Amino acid sequence: MPKYIFITGGVVSSLGKGIASASIGRILEAKGLKVTLQKFDPYINVDSGTMNPYQHGEVYVTEDGAETDLDLGHYERFTNIVAGRVNNTTAGQIYHEVIAKERRGDFLGATIQVVPHITDAIKERIREATRGRRVDIVLSEIGGTVGDIESLPFLEAVRQFRHEVGRENSLFIHLTLVPFIRAAGELKTKPTQHSVGTLREIGIQPDILICRTEKKLTKALKDKIALFCNVDASAVIEARDVPTIYQVPLMFKEQKLDEVICRYLRIEYKAGSLYHWQKQVVQKVLSPKTSVKIAVVGKYIELQDAYKSIYEALRHGGIANDAEVVIKRVNAEKLLKKTAGYHLKGVFGILVPGGFGMRGIEGKVSAIQFARENKVPFLGICLGMQCATIEFARNVLQWKAANSTEFNKKTPYPVISLLEEQEGIENLGGTMRLGAYPCHVKKETLAYRAYRSEEVMERHRHRYEFNNKYREIFQKNGLRISGISPGGKLVEIIEIEDHPWFVACQFHPEFKSKPDKAHPLFREFIKSALDYQEKSKPPAGSTSVGSEISNKEAEKPVLAIERPT
């Protein structure tokens, strides 16, 4: 029988349950345990696919094509799991499933209630994570904050679940805040006490507390928290702000969180080593040999989480090259053709990420033109590849009206067009080309040099494709098609022949990148940027434009505040 760990959060949102869960998964895997992780989101949306990035952050795509919460990205980056639909459940999915059963008559006319029907459906999702596979420990993260109305069915479900499997097979971990009041010069435990009190009112007594804090918790403070929250002093774990989120597993390991978990779950304790993680990831993040500046040109630049996986994959590419990646955020809506040189001054690589809609497209096209004409290393992803295709058609083939039918249905040169199977689809949610698809990589190309393989699997999330009607004329004029789908129907990767490193792909490589195993395209992109930097001398006394952030500030990690630079 597998063991179950339920992770909740209190006081305020964005404390970092996702990173905490992923870090716990990492230290348990180091012991040779087989783990899987789940995220339970209390919102009514069926999935993240149609949610605004400004409200929700990026949509993370799994191998099986699920559009999920971004925390699943942390799970896959920190651990060895391959997440799928069973790893992310929303309240919307649960209610949709129960209502569908009621409509079919499955409940034989019974009155449908939150307890037991909704809670039973949630418990079934917990069990589903281990069905048909060997799993030692299931970590289930409950989204939201204790006290939220929408989270109550999930908390009641896990309370019941513990009663069913027993205390020796289940564990509650509560992530809470111990704020530092600067005016008083003190850390305050009262918010944690109130949060645990609210949880206990629901019927859940946490076994372990993870305390998010700016300052070190003294032994006296830990003892006070343990006394008033009714937990062992050894089970009060400090989650102090650290220079990089990848230090969090080391911090938990140092405080023997893994030992406490094993004791509660009655698992034989094995030390487990994080030596490789420390040497190959953390040490290289904290002490890189060099640095390189990369521009990310997008329309969701203001929001930290909208390009979370992009920023992480760039960081991974830096780790693989022993370099810090300094990111220059460029708002595509403010970038014009005549100002491209001004906005992109001093960068040694340009990345245009995915997205939807017309807003910012002309800025992205201008950035790509700058990269192509000035031989700056370029990586385009999804919409970034489509914009690269449009730019090539307009400025190399001189088809000035070339466009995607997503932006101009009447364009005389529809170089990007809707997939045939997408014609007539009305519902937006879950209807795109989603999940992992095979790609054949042609030899003697930049893509093959990166992958070192002719067959790869990559994750997609899009409706529009390269229009095969124009494939021949593009290739005759210097655009190389280096990746295609099996059978050659779809263009997956394009390159510019007379450019040192210009690669754009229709898929999302950032979703398969890990800190100790950078995605090949990101690894080679950063390598080419470093090579370009060596050959170029940045202008003396140049002033930066836009928001520049180091790889340790590309996002503000929800469990770690990056060190000042």
Image: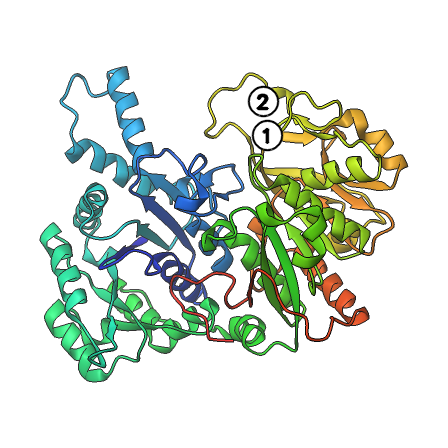
Residue 235 at what x, y percent from top left? 24, 71
Q: Residue at x 68, y 75 (%)?
A: 541
- Residue 145 horizontal side relative to residue 360, left or right: left
Residue 29, compared with residue 339, is above or below; it is below
Q: How many marks?
A: 2
> At which x and y percent is residue 31?
43, 67
Please name the residue that numbered disc 1 is placed on: 463
Residue 382 showing in the rendered view: no
Callout 1–callout 2 Cβ contact below 8 Å:
yes
Q: Residue at x 20, y 77 (%)?
A: 222
Give the alpha-carbon distance from disc 1 to disc 2, as whole Å. Answer: 7 Å
In the rendered structure, which amino acid carries the disc numbered 2?
Gln
Q: Nearest the camera: 167 or 429?
A: 429
Work out which residue is located at the far bottom of the displayed protein and give it: 219
- Left/right placement of residue 333 relative to residue 232 reads right
- At x 38%, y 72%, the residue is 241
Q: Nearer the viewer, residue 251 or 396?
A: 396
- Horizontal side, residue 122 vs residue 132: left or right: left
- Residue 9 x, y percent position in the rendering: 26, 57
As drawn, the label of residue 556 is none
- Disc marking residue 422: 2
136 relative to 193, above or below? above
- Disc 1 or 2, which lies upstream in sequence? 2
User: How are the residues colored?
Assistant: rainbow
Specify whether 143 is left or right of 461: left
**Looking at the picture, how far across and down is residue 195, in whole percent?**
17, 60
